[in-house]
Amino acid sequence: MTEKAKLYIARKLPEPLEQMLEPFFDVNSNPIEILEAKEELLKKVQGITALVTDSRVKVDEEVINAAGSQLKVISNYAAGFNNIDVETATKKGIAVTNTPIAVNNATADIAWALMFGVARRVAEGDRLIRTGEPWGWTPSFFLGRDFTGKTLGIIGAGQVGKTMAKRASGFSMDIIYSDSRPNAELERESGAKQVSLETLLTAADYISIHTPLTPETRHMISTKELAMMKPTSILINTSRGPVVDEQALVEALKNRTIWGAGLDVFENEPYVNQELFKLDNVVMTPHIGTATPDARRAMAVMAAQNILDIMEGKMPIGIVNREVLNK
């Protein structure tokens, strides 16, 4: 009987993942959702052929080397992959995968929730009512921002960006996007127009970020970019925190350089710049963009399928470093 290849799951993840992989691997897993110490991770990965991680598990060169030369695939249970040293993995011929398609709807939903929350001052109104202080309607009371007919700027025209555009069509919004590559499907389905980042920043009423975190996108939005935006504009970030220079955003919100912001991700999470707590024109959620049962289950299925595809010599949908399989 042929011995099964070893696989390690670095965090307790939804059940479909392990069920799909157990018939093909000798599976070992972290039985709890709490991250284990790196020293423990370095021991657990030794001799494995496949590793399942999530966005909080740091897979650096040391971890990759500890696994050994037989490691073939690192499957990230996340839409991003900035927690993995992709460069080292690629040099060693290790496939890196993620789960982008599985999170489309849930991530677009939280982005829209933040847009509504900021534009119509939902959280601010909730806080006002909870004080118990008297309040009453006047023509200028609690004015927010409109959606219908406004311009939505999407930074990063991938699957989530495309889903955002579909939602925007229902509000008769003009849609522009900035990406290194044109997206013909996005343009065909929503009438979106590709523009430069500078044009997007100056033209959009709402800006929603959906780009991965790479060296090129780190602090893509900082003081210069925020100054380009309309004073009535709203910035939404549900991608990765470091794409936005958080201190620069604090200053822009304090000075009313922009009207408001909605954040599901933060530059140094779980730490959040405490100056944000003092501002009424920002709505924050604790990185819950994919936090629905359907999305989390779909991520588990995709993370498992990515591994099975690699082992069968197929190109997974979630491949990050395609060049490893094209050799």
Image: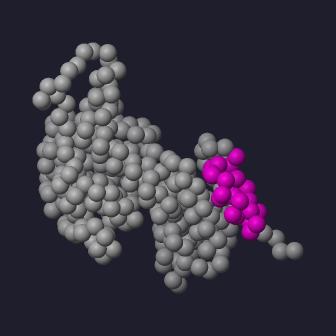
Q: Is 151 in the magenta? A: no
Residue placed most toward the observer, 265 or 67: 265
Q: Residue at x 26, y 31 (%)?
A: 280
Q: Residue at x 43, y 59 (%)?
A: 104
Residue placed most toward the observer, 246 or 235: 235
Q: Is 27 in the magenta? A: yes
Asked if residue 270 is positioned above or below residue 169 in the image, the reply reads above
Residue 315 position in % (x across, y down): 55, 78
Residue placed most toward the observer, 24 or 63: 24
Left/right of residue 244 with respect to residue 43 in the rendered view: left
Asked if residue 223 is positioned above or below residue 307 in the image, the reply reads above
Residue 200 position in % (x across, y down): 19, 60
Residue placed most toward the observer, 24 or 187: 187
Left/right of residue 277 with respect to residue 11 in the rendered view: left
Residue 319: tell me if it is visible: yes
**Residue situated furthest right in the rendering:** 1
Q: Residue at x 68, y 49 (%)?
A: 30
Left/right of residue 321 with respect to residue 68 in the rendered view: left
Read off the magenta span: 11-31
Left/right of residue 231 with respect to residue 98 in the rendered view: left
Residue 12 position in % (x across, y down): 64, 49
Asked if residue 135 is positioned above or below residue 224 in the image, the reply reads above
Question: Residue 64, located in which quarter of the rendered image?
Answer: bottom right
Residue 87 position in % (x across, y down): 47, 68
Residue 216: tell me if it is visible: no
Q: Residue at x 20, y 21 (%)?
A: 136
Question: Residue 199, located in which quarter of the rendered image?
Answer: bottom left
